[in-house]
Amino acid sequence: MSFKENMNLYSKGDKAFVYLNMFLIAMFTASTLYPFIYVASLSFSLGDAVTAGKVFLTPVDFTVAAYEMVVFDPAFWTSYRNTFIYTVGGTLTSLLFIIPCAYALSRPQLAGRKYWNMMIAFTMWFNAGMIPFFLNMRDLGLLDSYFGIIIGFACNAFNIILLRNFFEAVPASFEEAARMDGANDFQVLWQVFIPLAKPAIATITLFCIVSRWNGFFWAMILLRDEEKIPLQVYLRQIITQLSDDDTFASSLITSAYSFETVSSAIMVLSIIPVLLVYPWVQKSFNKGIMLGGVKE
Amino acid sequence: MSTVKLKNLVKSYGDVTVVQGINLEVKPKEFVVLVGPSGCGKSTTLRMLAGLEEISGGEVSIAERVINDVAPKDRDVAMVFQNYALYPHLTVADNIAFGLRIRKVPKDEIRKIVTEVAETLELTPLLERRPADLSGGQRQRVAMGRAIVRHPKVFLFDEPLSNLDAKLRTQMRAEIKQLHKRLGVTSVYVTHDQVEAMTLADRIVVMSNGKIEQVGTPMELFNSPANTFVATFIGSPPMNLIEATAEVSDAGCYALFEGQRCLLPTLSQLSNGEEIIIGIRPEYIDIEPTENASAINVSIDLVETLGSEALLHCKFLGKPFVIKVETHGQLTHLESLNKLYFRQNAITVFDKKTTNAMIAADNK
Amino acid sequence: MEDINHSLSTPEPMLLVKSRRVVKHLRKEWQLYLMLLPTIIWFIVFLYKPMYGLQIAFKDYSVFKGITSSPWVGLEHFYTLFNNDQFIRAIQNTVMISGASLIFGFPIPIILALMFNEIINPKFKKTAQTIVYLPHFISAVIIAGIVITAFAPSTGVINLMLNAMGFDSVYFLTKPEWFRTIFVGTGIWQEAGFGSIVFLAAVAGVSPSLYESAVVDGASRFQMMYKITIPCILPTILIMLIIKIGNILEVGFEMIIMLYQPATYETADVISTFIYRQGLQAAQYDLAAAAGLFNAVIAFLLVITANTISKRVSKTSLW
């Protein structure tokens, strides 16, 4: 649409419309960004400045005291390490389950394919809920264990169906040609389908990473041992102290850092990894994989 | 060098039978083309041969070995697919080597074979490229390379040229033909394009509705079609058909239509007043009187010029009728043409009821 | 083929013929089933087995007796629930919060998508999109942390601004009348950008020739948006609306758990948080399971209905 790019061809009204629109989008974008900037500024401000209510946009009396406080807390590093374990272990486990399953479900020669698919899709609409799931985890002896968190959330129907759809769209001749060349199912999957589905697999991997990194509810429920909790649960403990117990919080305030600055610092530190993978997440939008063919 | 035999081959999906008892023997080194309109069962037949479709009934054998229950990889056949099935993530060399790698051929040997094949197909400078960076013709050659490397007993081609533009198709057709000459491997080729069939085949198998209509060399099919289906399917433009009534007397056999009378080949089975269809190829119609030719009155509606040749369009009994003539650089005399000459031995007579040919006209 | 001949000549029992076919199929395709097996087992162990455990909703569950041996009590837990003001309140709150999210949150992604579509500078567009999609990928804990910090009574930016304008500080998170506004607003802030993707995709699917012919006809950009884009993406809007209504019982309870406190229960407590408190905090498993079952069944019916309707609207299934 060459017309669209050529502003000279626009009428006055259209130009005004375009600029107003740009302004509004800029406002919305700024309001999306502001809370992050606010938190970052808090984390770099002096505790006293925050307590005195001086911080709006930029750090006041710049200091890294809050970060020092966080970095020297062993519980922070334990939870950070645990989150890495859950994220890496969980994501790999998920892929190990999801990829072969999606491949099998996409093959027309699989008997009862319709029923297997239904069995998996059904869980998207109906699940037993919190309590039976918890009791089941308890009965399986998976409370308070790394393995429980990793295996208990390994699969979800949505990711399987997403990848299955991608595999189904691969022309049949790719499998047939490989088969005539003597490849078995594992070879077809490993040497043909996985390389072909790289963008879809990358998308699913990112979904897994983000949901693992962000997951806190079940970790909070299933883990009792402080040595095993992930970052989000640790962060929650800090934040709830902040909101629940004002007197306790204020008793810890020194001039260098306050509860606000410390919790902000932890938030910043836990957002950073998400920001690091975010460009790849973006790329998978641009490739049009998500939501079945999003075009830029 | 292997014989391929199809014995009473049947394929059905539930109640629908798409291949209804095919019998065919492909001789060693022969190039056989299965041709027919889409949905005629030609691809299904090929895929049963490849082992990609289960066989519902009958028998397939290669080199005297029944292979009904043999896995595709153990049939010793190679196939070129319509979309080539080149793996986009692999280089040309790796694509060609894919089958060898799966079969765990030693690396040195793979390199040697791939180099050889690449030379045969003039792919050497492209070996490190990926399929996305190749032209249509180059992709086609890589697909053939992948089939050749394994030295299979039989080559199968599933409409391999249908994704190419017209010019490239002609060129690749010639390359396939040459390759077949050089390698001499028994080949079965499926296409819906009769020109491809005519130019490539040693023998053509014309199929429709899951059955074989006729098997024969290209010229046999062209000159002596077994029925009106083959007559109109083979040849471009197709054979002209005119519904007529037979007139048999001592003077000979004639066809009557639109008040005109046309001398037919002498056919003993023809009876007076029988409903027939006469067929005559556009190429075999004369515009100057010749021996044993009937003069037919005509008015030309349209002249389409192709350069050295022209197509004249007219109508008989309301149905289009086409004549292909040489122009000798002139068109004016064609538009005013009012007489055509149907040579007796250029005419094929079909029974109107069965649509089968009664006897084939002699060649020219 | 041999199978067919055999069964015609010697009347073999069907079972034998069938089982032979199964064995042949498995011998050929066993790898596929091997690939499928782990996930199927996972689904049975982690998602279907808990469905068996749902029976405690009708039982007097005792940890010592286990799920199977606990005695049946029929619908007792359901009577208890529906005579429980807190549960009734939780249902009301769920519908209220979801309804408000739908009414205020649904149009915004559509408007955003339309606005993004009108941006000419590709770099500006890309940057803006990158930023507004981001909150979707941030965890509930952090979002809640930001909210708590920003709304804090003495140091939060919101109250600082109120003070600057001459108002008194409000401890928002302890005020029931503010909870819904804060929660719904946060939800919109977090998801509106990401929600616009599906509408942007629909907008991208509109044929450019429609706009070009409109330009030739002298339409303004606003008219084009109003007369071409919106009608063209209407089916997508409708389907998304139906899906959203189908999911009305789904509330981001992780966020609520973070944000609510006893003082705000009267507006903040939803079904999921009720189940969480009754079941996981107070260990009344059977009662909470009954509440969960009620919730799951209603949600299931809503989703199925929504899916059926949207199938009819779009003529294609969503899954």
Image (tube, coloured by chain):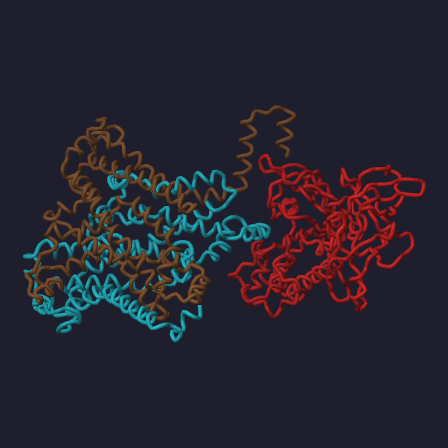
Figure colour of chain A:
cyan
Q: Residue at x 18, y 34 (%)?
A: C81
Quarter the C terminus of chain B occupies: bottom right
| Foreground pick, C169 / A93 | C169
Q: Residue furthest right?
A: B250
Can see residue B93?
yes
In percent of width and height, residue B211 lies at 70, 41
Can see residue B29?
no
Figure colour of chain C:
brown
Q: Tell me which corner region of the image, top left, top right, bottom left or bottom right, holds residue C130.
A: bottom left
Is residue A42 shown left or right of residue B141? left
Is residue A62 shown left or right of residue B267? left
Q: Residue at x 26, y 36 (%)?
A: C293
Q: Tell me which corner region of the image, top left, top right, bottom left or bottom right, holds residue C16.
A: top right
In percent of width and height, residue A15 lies at 33, 72
Figure colour of chain B:
red
In percent of width and height, residue A278 lies at 33, 63
Is residue A251 shown left or right of residue B3? left
| Foreground pick, A2 / A172 | A2
In percent of width and height, residue B321 lies at 75, 52
Q: How many marks?
A: 0
| Foreground pick, A157 / B67 | A157
Q: Residue at x 59, y 50 (%)?
A: A180
Q: Tell me which corner region of the image, top left, top right, bottom left or bottom right, holds residue A13.
A: bottom left
In this view, C219 is above or below A6: above
Is residue C229 shown left or right of residue C53? right
| Foreground pick, A40 / A35 | A35
